[in-house]
Image (spheres, helix red, strand yellow):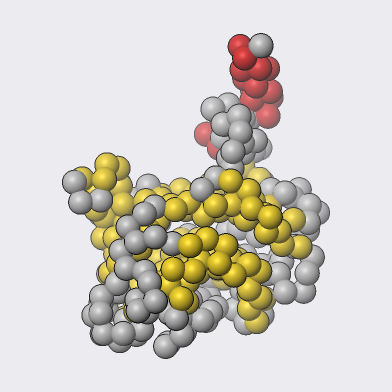
Amino acid sequence: MADERILKRCSEGRNGNLILSPTEGFWSNCPTVEVNPEVSAYEFFDDFMFSNIGDVTSKWMLDNTNGTVAAGSGATYGLGGMAIFNTGATDEDWVNLKGWDSDNAGGPFKITANSGKKLWFESKFYLTAVGAVEVVAFYVGLMDGLTTEPMADATGERNMVDGLYFRTLSDASTELDFATTRNSTETEVKAAINTLVKGTFVRVGFYFDGANTVQAFINGVATSTVVNVSATTFPYDVGLCPYVGIKTTEAVNKIAVVDWVKCIQMR
């Protein structure tokens, strides 16, 4: 029976651009872009294997106040590529990467109700300092291309016009929230959707079903947190870019280690 299921899956993949897609979990039924990019989907993916992060040849635009991002791997951070975000050691230092929007004009991903254009976003990361006394803000997700610094001073609260993202605030760095922002007004969809542990990787993601629903995932498992795309608080029909950013709200350097960022959307 297992072999029959695999054969059926492969047959479906040849017709639906699903070859090598997993049979279950977050990425199940996600198109494999390399099969036929013209008719299937488009993809942003970075495993941070190279050290040109933020350069003109990079996939990312870097914005910062004293903060830095560099590639790292090996004994310190593990095999494969990692992006090491350092905030800098001055109060309100920050750094973020914005993907695929070097001219601040817009973004390649857009979630529109009933468009049929399904979307998958996921990233894997950890913070080296979390806890009641560790005042650090961290954001990862999709945000508008005009955003330079996605987190405000002191509190770390949102500072973008539109976005769909996971974040920590400065007064609760162990608490990972899921939120949306539309026209500079934020809605906290789910507070404490996950509790972060210092130095422990977590995968966060969300899936748009192409109709009217975005669902949040933690470590590849669907949560009960669902967002209505048609809601006036959702950044519908707005071009969005992948973002990762971190900010310290004390004079202490804070570090985020990001293993990868991936977003795929149907054409």
Q: Quadrant of residue 134?
A: bottom left
Is 249 situated left or right of 230 in this image?
A: left
Q: Quadrant of residue 230?
A: bottom right
Residue 127: horizontal and vertical position, in percent? 35, 63
Is 139 situated left or right of 240 in this image?
A: left
The relative height of residue 120 versus residue 159 in the rendered view (above or below) is: above
Image point 40% across, 66% down: which residue?
97
Residue 231: horizontal and vertical position, in percent? 78, 69
Residue 139: horizontal and vertical position, in percent? 47, 68
Image point 68% across, 23% down: which residue?
12
Q: Is residue 39 visible?
A: yes
Residue 20: horizontal and vertical position, in percent? 54, 27
Extreme-left residue of the structure: 75
Quadrant location of the N terminus? top right
Residue in the foreground of this view, choosing between 146 and 254:
254
Image point 56% across, 31% down: which residue?
22
